[in-house]
Amino acid sequence: MIAVYGAGGIGCYVGGRLAATGTPVTFVGRPRTADEVAAHGLRLTDYLGADLQVADVRFETTPAGAAGADLVLVTVKSAATSQAADELAEVLPPDAVVVSFQNGVRNAEVLRSRLPSQVVVAGMVPFNVLNRGGGVFHQGTEGKLDVQRDPALAPYAEAFERAGLPLTQHDDVLPVQWSKLLLNLNNPINALSNLPLRDELSQRAYRRCLAAAQAEALELLAAAGIRPAQLLAVPMQRFPAVLRLPDFLFRRLASKVLAVDPLARTSMWEDLEAGRPTEIDYLNGEVVRLAASLGRTAPVNAKLVSLIREAETSRRTWAGPDLLGSIM
């Protein structure tokens, strides 16, 4: 049995795709999501036109729902990782496999420290999922699931392949995680813009904000000896320069970046809309933390952290030029 622990947008989508193609899945999440799924079932759609329905969903709201699971996909928010690990330690068998499909770069370490008897694997979900309400979860951008290579995953590879979410295994997943984090530095910009991703990225001022955040992070990563993996056609080291291009050139040279579903938004935008705490400390805050470890500062990313902290209590929409002026 596979359990999804922290079944929100990513968890419901990934687990739902598995369940829709015949894999037994138990979802463990909040009562509000359980009520939504109980009323509507799960419907999984994507930017390519997929439309899958899961009517009979096993959704639990306590840690006991994961008891006896062979594979656990942890999709809780990063701030809840320690608590999730302690809860899982009470119910999982010692040979269970636990995969962290979370934002950030340190969640697998936290899980591993609290689950010494289980196999813990770092993973990464590269695509965006939007909760459209009514049990509908929509994948708005492309990407496959990335995981640290581990033989314990072999029994489950076929199920993920059948679900249309094949596992791409890496000898070292950290460079992949950092590349995803570099892309996720756009999350606060998108949330503050209050625009769909495609509309936000179509405007040069917003892209220049992202370019500044990425360039700052890339300089720190180079100093730390970390080389991000190449996830896009353009190497990550060159991506800030592409983002700074005028709109007409960007549309011509980076059309794939704009080829995202018009519905796609970031999870940080969803969190602000719902009045929930965001994961800013585990995205741009991770860059600030890396800078401190090197005896440096990261003023652009620190400012974005500050603006999101303000937005968590007082929502404000920023025009691109205003946001750029604020962080530069």
Image (tube, rainbow, N blue to C red):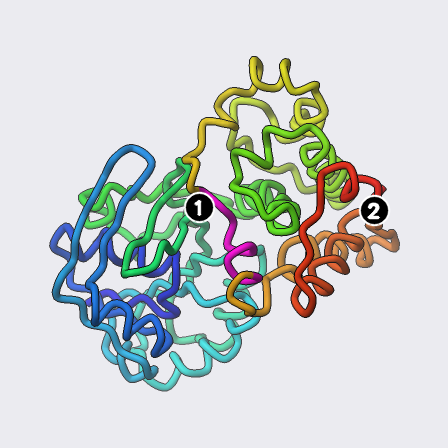
- Which span is picked out in magenta? 264-272
**Quadrant containing the N terminus in the rendered view:** bottom left
**Magenta: main secondary structure:** helix
Q: Distance between the residues labelled 1 and 2?
A: 27 Å
| Coordinates of residue 308 in the picture (x, y in percent) | 69, 59
| Coordinates of residue 231 in the picture (x, y in percent) | 51, 32
Task: From the viewer's perspective, tell me whether residue 295 is left or right of residue 123.
Answer: right
Q: Which residue is drawn at 35% across and 63% down?
A: 73
- Depicted 252 relative to depicted 167: above or below: above
Q: Which residue is drawn at 80% across and 58% down?
A: 293
Asked whether disc 1 touches disc 2, contact meaning CB atoms under 8 Å apart, the reply is: no
| Coordinates of residue 290 in the picture (x, y in percent) | 75, 54
**Quadrant containing the C terminus in the rendered view:** top right
Q: Which residue is drawn at 34% across and 59% down?
A: 133
- Residue 316: within the magenta? no
- Residue 265: within the magenta? yes
Q: Which amino acid does label 1 sit on?
A: Asn
The quadrant holding residue 78 is bottom right
- Callout 2 secondary element: helix
Query: Residue under circle 1?
Result: 128
Query: Residue under circle 2?
Result: 326
Q: What residue type is labelled 2?
A: Ser
**Front one among 209 and 26:** 209
Task: From the viewer's perspective, tell me whether residue 68 is left or right of residue 289.
Answer: left
The total number of labels drawn is: 2
Task: From the viewer's perspective, tell me whether residue 97 is left or right of residue 112.
Answer: left
| Coordinates of residue 70 in the picture (x, y in percent) | 24, 68
Q: Which of marks 1 and 2 is in front?
A: 2
